[in-house]
Each structure stands twice: as structure tokens, then as C-alpha cells.
Image (cartoon, rainbow, N blue to C red):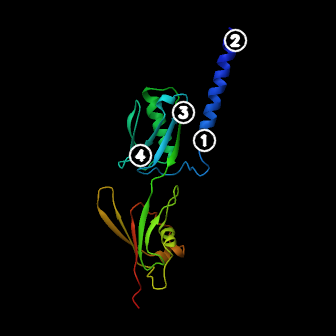
Amino acid sequence: MIFRSIRFAGLLLSLGGCGLLAETAQPPTQKADYVLQPLDMIKIQIFQEEDLSRDVRISQEYTVTLPLIGSVDLRNKTIRQAQDQIQDLYRRDFLVNPQINIIVVEYAKRSINVLGAVGAPGVVYFPQEEGLTLLDAISRAGSFNRLADRKHVKLTRTTAEGKTETYVINADSIIQGTTNETWVILRDDVIYVPERIL
């Protein structure tokens, strides 16, 4: 009986160690506030429920399908919010106090086009786990050239409903700090910097 208790205690310690490893397995660049994107590959770990853990790719509709709970919508969810959502779904009907850990195994490639009066017009790729603002994108395209009309930068994007919207942005006001709007760039946006009329 004592021997069995010792083995059971050892098993608990072993499982606890596994949980600790799972919790610390996130790479240093992993950010809990990273907003998950379509085609990101994520590892969903459920502590002490290895048969429910999965590596899944987020669909173009922002969903993943998981055992027992089915389809989960992760649109506009950060890693932390997705963990909480999945935890709630499992807790509701299936598991007692589930511990969920999500790691992005592979980030979807994201790019935009920056055209017009910039040093190196063309495709600009997003940093893997970070966001991108209008000025960041222009900087990655070689910055404004000497003919750029920085007060009339055009940003064209397609909404989730398939509608095309174009915004005219005064980049000078962002540079000078007279506005709080930084214009966070989304995948497949097109930025066009016109030339000044001399």
C-alpha cells in the first residue's frame, strides 16, 4: 500500500513537471496579445488530456475544429483570449478546470503592397508575430522619396464582406504627432504614395 502511494505521488510529480514544461515551452518571442490570423498553425495543449491536444491550422474563416467542442471561431482573438474561450467551452460540458496553452507553431505569411513615391515600391512582408503601421510599411519600402506627397497617402483595403474601401491619410500629421491614429495595416492592404504637384 505504501509502495503504491509512493508510485502515485511520483506520477503526480511527473505530470506536474510535464505541465510546467508545457507552460514554459513558449518561445521567447511568443506574445499573448498577438492576434491570431488565418493560416496560422497553432498547437493547442490541454494539460493531462494529451488525446485532446492538437496542431491545427486556422481556416480562412478564422475557425479551428477541436475534439468534443467542434468548430471554434477565433476571429479577432489574441492568444490569451483564444485560450480563455477554448477553456470555457471545454469547462462547460466536458472537463473540470481545463488548463489550455496555445503556441503559434507557424505564422501565416502576410504581405501588402506599397506603391508610388517610395524608395523601393513593391511587396512588403509583415514581421512574423508583430503588427505593422502605415509608417512602418512605408519605411520598409524605402521611405518617402523627395517627390512624395505625404499629406495624401492612399490606403486601399478589402473588407471581410468583399467591399473595397479607400482612405486618404495625412502621414505628416502622424509623423508630427498631431494625431493619435497610427493606421494599423491589415494583410493584403495596398498603400499608394502619390507625387506632389510641382
N-terminal of the pair, mark 1 or mark 4, is: 1
Q: Which mark is residue 56?
A: none
N-terminal of the pair, mark 1 or mark 2, is: 2
- Quarter in which the N terminus is drawn: top right
N-terminal of the pair, mark 3 or mark 2, is: 2
N-terminal of the pair, mark 4 or mark 3, is: 4
Cα distance, mark 1 to mark 2?
A: 33 Å
Contact between labelled residues 3 and 4, with CB atoms less than 8 Å apart:
no
Q: Is residue 13 above or below residue 55?
A: above
Q: Nearer the viewer, mark 4 or mark 3?
A: 4
Residue 153 falls in which quadrant of the image? Answer: bottom left
Foreground: 20 or 165?
20
Q: Which residue is mark 4?
A: 58
Q: Amino acid at mark 4?
A: Ile
Cα distance, mark 4 to mark 3?
A: 21 Å
The residue lying at 57 percent from left, 49 percent from top is 30
Q: Which mark is residue 3?
A: 2
Q: Which residue is mark 3?
A: 99
Examine the rendering and report whether any part of residue 178 can be seen. no
Helix or strand or loop: what does disc 1 sit on?
A: loop
Helix or strand or loop: what does disc 4 sit on?
A: loop
Q: Which residue is mark 1?
A: 25
Contact between labelled residues 4 and 1, with CB atoms less than 8 Å apart:
no
Q: Amino acid at mark 2?
A: Phe
N-terminal of the pair, mark 3 or mark 1, is: 1
